[in-house]
Amino acid sequence: MMHGEIQYVVRHTNKFTYTAPISESMMEVRMQPRSDVRQRCLRFELTPQPRAKVFAYQDPYGNVVHHFDIPGRHARLTITADAVVQLAPAAELPESVPTATWDELDAIAASGERWEDLRFSHFARETPLLAELADEFHWRRDADALTLLRRLNYALFHQFTYAPRTTHVDSPIDDALKVRAGVCQDLAHIMIALARRIGIPCRYVSGYLSPSPDAHDRSVEGATHAWAEAYVPTLGWVGFDPTNDLLAGDRHIRVAVGRDYADVPPTRGVFRGEAGSELGVLVTISLPNTPIKSDKVMPMQTWITPETGEGIDRAEEQQQQ
């Protein structure tokens, strides 16, 4: 390991409990951390219980997607992902970039390059409430792109309350905009939509935020995390975490990227049977050979779905907290 690099050991567990035995589970999983210039996934293991043969492919965004099918009857399904991830130090960003960067961004848009990160998407879209927020923030090209993104990161942090259970996994951004509250998933979508609104390519990142005793993170330990990445010419992709008013750095572990949450849910699947389901999620992150103190581990977070009343497939997803 080179000087300044950090290794993290990550365990992410999703536990589905059904109100009655079901006959089949089919699941798609995006839990393997990405490997790129700054981050390397040194080891990864995915273990479903009941046991199943796991297959994998790479999606168009370069994310590794595992999938499996459990055809037998079962009342519980546990998915455990173990990873060792190595991060290099983040490069120090300048305070600003040249205003000519706007010309480069316009040229990118005109060429059709990065079109998927410039167009509104399922969760990151234009709405009247988003337009009102843009007016309130005086959101226009009145400074260089990096300065504007820093301001937006700060403004979202201070104008929105971090409030788990205010919104749901499939909530449109208007749900958070109405009450000025939500979780990291909501704030990332709002930032992405506003960036795209003025021609800055922006995408959604799912992953984890390593806890730090010196930090004052609003996002909770023991959960997945989400933030936004904006493309700034000469700098490349720059991560912004509006939930915590942070630039994505050495504590942000990237798992998957996409246009919005719809492209990168940690788990997406269906089960067949007449049952409701409860999902518990637990994430632990530690340095190698560092025991995790029990008081630092958040209890399982749970989401409940009601009884279906029919023997049909039911979708299962988790909200990023």
Image: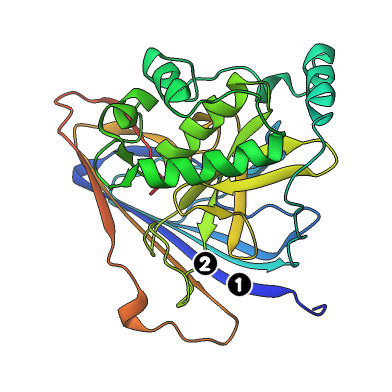
Task: Please tell me which residue lies in front, 144 or 196.
Answer: 144
Vertical comparison of 183 with 83: above or below: above
x then y, percent, for residue 233: 82, 36
Vertical comparison of 296 with 282: above or below: below
Task: Please tell me which residue lies in front, 313 or 132.
Answer: 132
Task: Please tell me which residue lies in front, 11 or 242.
Answer: 242
Q: Which residue lies under the disc numbered 2?
A: 210
Q: Is residue 168 left or right of residue 110?
A: left
Q: Are marks 2 and 1 in contact (CB under 8 Å)?
A: yes
Q: Which residue lies under the disc numbered 1?
A: 8
Number of numbered tags placed on the structure image: 2
Vertical comparison of 177 with 35: above or below: above
Res 223 visible = yes
Residue found 68% across the figure and 32% down from its top: 143
Residue found 72% across the figure and 51% down from its top: 95
Res 266 visible = no
Task: Please tell me which residue lies in front, 38 or 234.
Answer: 234
- Secondary structure, mark 2, is loop
- Secondary structure, mark 1, is strand
Q: Is residue 245 left or right of residue 300?
A: right
Amino acid residing under circle 1: Tyr
